Amino acid sequence: MLRQPIVTILGHVDHGKTSLLDYIRGSAVAAKEAGGITQAIGASIVPLEVIRKTCGSLLDALKLKLTIPGLLFIDTPGHAAFINLRKRGGNLADIAILVIDITKGLEPQTVECIQILKQYKTPFVVALNKIDTLDGWKRGKGLLLKQASEQQEQVQRLFETKLYEIVGKLFELGINAERFDRVPDYTKTIALVPTSAKTGDGVPELLMVLTGLAQKFLESSLKAVDGPAKGTVLEVKETAGLGVTMDAIVYEGVLKAGDTIVIGSSEEPLVTKVKAILVPAALAEMREKKTKFQTVKTVSAAMGVKLSAPDIDNVQAGMPFIVAHDVEKAKLEIQGDVEAVTLQTAETGVIIKADTLGSLEALSFLLQEKNIPVTRASVGPITKKDLSDAQALIVKDPLFAVILGFNIPAPDVSTNIKVFTNPIIYRLIEDYEAWKAGMARNQAQGELDKLTKPAKIQLLAGYVFRQSNPAVVGTEVLAGTLRPGTRLMRLTGEPVTEARTLQDEQESITEAKKGRRIAVSYPDVVIGRQLKEGDILYSSITENEFRQFKEFKDLLTNEEKELLKEIASLMREKNPVWGV
């Protein structure tokens, strides 16, 4: 006997994930969500008879004996994708639908979703949604996608162009993809199914592809298990007439009313007893307030359920639970699952926090992809200990003395530790990278400011105010920046003096840039002997300074780069490998 495959829908915000699921189940959840964006994870059961009715003759082409009882769809909030739907060593989803707006293509959250799908090695199909928004597209009016597309003479070229732009972008990410009816081998190529959540075009084909793939390639992993249930918490909330309840997915085994369960926690695992099991009606959405639930004595995987149990007020979403015949053994197993995520991963790195284990895993993985080390990862709000640990990291590396919090509030205490929080993973990482780049730039600029600024100056004829002790001469900055204390050399590379003080209108200044004329005092020289009116001088830069300038070349202006080339050219007349 096979269980229902768990299907997750994910993709970039506003690409039509919930609307697509709405069309499948004939509900209107999307219209009731704030801003049309899914606000909480939900589950919907689509029985096999509904799939048969929707797909019609399409299923005949599969030439498969369908034995799966239906599909369990999990809808996920925006960017969070299916990261909360986790089990030890993997993800709950047996297969996923990646929704892409065909008019917009791959966006940041799309790429993030693909990275996570690849991380968990989850098979998926792509729904190229919103084909109805292509200029000139005519609704299929009950026709199957192939028949409907043949009527799109005016828009056919645009449709194919958009399709293969997405195929090209997916290929750049290491994914071979093709339109579902042109796929030569589903084990090597991702199927793209054009769809419209508004008109329903492509929905029968999407269900056909999902059902066929699940039946043909996932059969061995869909075998129902009669043992104790394992599941994952979706949400904990107040339910009228029941008190605090727990929405969950039972992904393995059998759960019975009265079972003792152990639920994971960032501290001590919680032991409680299932008082009641409630299941939603077919095609209903668990999140809907008006959804009718039926009390049952037992459920088998895979199933979305609402559980009534004591002391679950502080249970966190994404935490695992198991039925416990041996409570102590179950507690060790559950705690091992939690600690597998909260272990330290590097001696020096950022501290990360998240609202759920799945979120934490996804954030950790995406940081790893960016080569950003993590020193500690844990679930829950930012604590004083987190701030204290981050403070200790300043000595090791201030660029890592930060806390990244995904989908959790910022701490309500004042602190000098940099804390980033964001409900969108890629934006959280972008914010940190931008700050880190700015800090690194400031550090580099600080090191750069310690070096001798490149300058090219000329002593102005007729503007000798004092010949010696020290000599004071009107000077024009031809290029670069002249500062007090800058060592100066002749065109031969021979050191001759320094710019001791700079004055403009008899007021001392700290620097003079290209084009400025100022009075400069030069010690240890006599004008007319060591220096003459009209002489051109350069900053006397050491080889070590020149090499450091090369390290900071991204912070230099084009003028400074050209001036350093001139100085190097002068020095290499005597020493060909100077500064190399």
Image: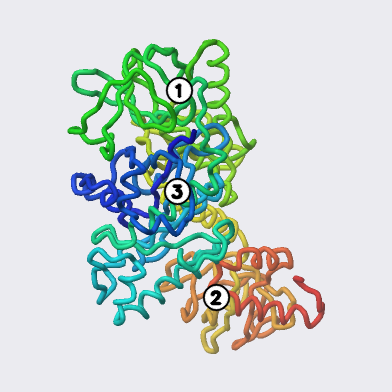
Report how far apart the C-alphas of labels 2 and 3 lie in the structure. 58 Å
From the viewer's perspective, tell me whether residue 218 is left or right of residue 272: right
Mark pair 3, 1: CA separation: 24 Å
Q: Earlier along the polypeptide chain: callout 1 or callout 2?
A: 1
Q: Is label 1 or label 2 in front?
A: 1
The numbered disc on residue 480 is 2
Which residue in the protein does label 3 denote?
Answer: 96
Query: Residue 478 location, x and y as percent?
Result: 54, 82
Q: Secondary structure at mark 3?
A: strand
Q: Quadrant of residue 495?
A: bottom right
Q: Residue 431: tell me if it is visible.
A: no
**Residue displayed at 62% across by 38% down:** 348
Q: Nearer the viewer, residue 161 or 420?
A: 161
Residue 254: give its label: 1
Observer-side mark, 3 or 1, equals: 1
Count of marks overlaid on the render = 3
Q: Nearer the viewer, residue 1 or 481?
A: 1
Does 250 appear above or below 444? above
Residue type at tag 2: Gly
Residue 151, image quadrant: bottom left
Residue 299 in the image: x percent, y percent?
Answer: 39, 24
Q: Where the C terminus falls, by quadrant?
A: bottom right
For the question of whether residue 176 can be seen, the reply is yes
- State the image coordinates of residue 503 (x, y, percent, origin top left): 47, 70
Q: Position of residue 105 (x, y in %)?
A: 40, 65
